[in-house]
Image: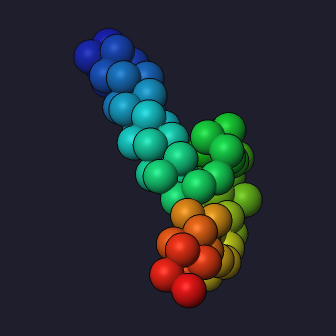
Amino acid sequence: MTLFYILLPIYAAFCLWLGFRIVQKAGFDGWWVLVLLIPAVNIMMIWVFAFIRWPTLQADIKQDL
């Protein structure tokens, strides 16, 4: 059982780091990844994040024009 309490923070930190990298590549502030720590809000924010326009994609569209 103690192994669980050792590995859980490592796993959580790894998931937050991955989320931080994804959020930054999308063009948002990396601090948004902390929303993942709030129950119920994290699920809503994943949906919001999936369907809003990403700043990096908007920049790419403007460069193509």
Figure quadrant of the C terminus: bottom right
Name which residue lies at 67% across and 44% down.
29
Rendered location of residue 31, percent (x, y) = 68, 38
Q: Is residue 45 left or right of residue 64?
A: right
Residue 27 image-quadrant placement: bottom right
- Compared to residue 65, the image places residue 39 above or below, namely above
- Compared to residue 38, the image places residue 41 above or below, namely below
| Viewer-nearest residue: 40 or 56 | 56
Figure quadrant of the N terminus: top left
Rendered location of residue 42, percent (x, y) = 64, 57
| Viewer-nearest residue: 37 or 18 | 18
Q: What coloring was used for the rendering? A: rainbow
Residue 40 image-quadrant placement: bottom right
| Viewer-nearest residue: 60 or 11 | 60
- Compared to residue 59, the image places residue 28 above or below, namely above
- Which residue is most to the bottom? 65
| Viewer-nearest residue: 39 or 46 | 46
Rendered location of residue 53, percent (x, y) = 64, 77
- Whether residue 46 appears in this view of the structure is no
Name which residue lies at 27% across and 16% down.
3
Name which residue lies at 47% across and 52% down.
25
- Compared to residue 9, the image places residue 30 above or below, namely below
Rendered location of residue 13, percent (x, y) = 44, 28
- Whether residue 14 appears in this view of the structure is yes
**Count of residue discs:** 0
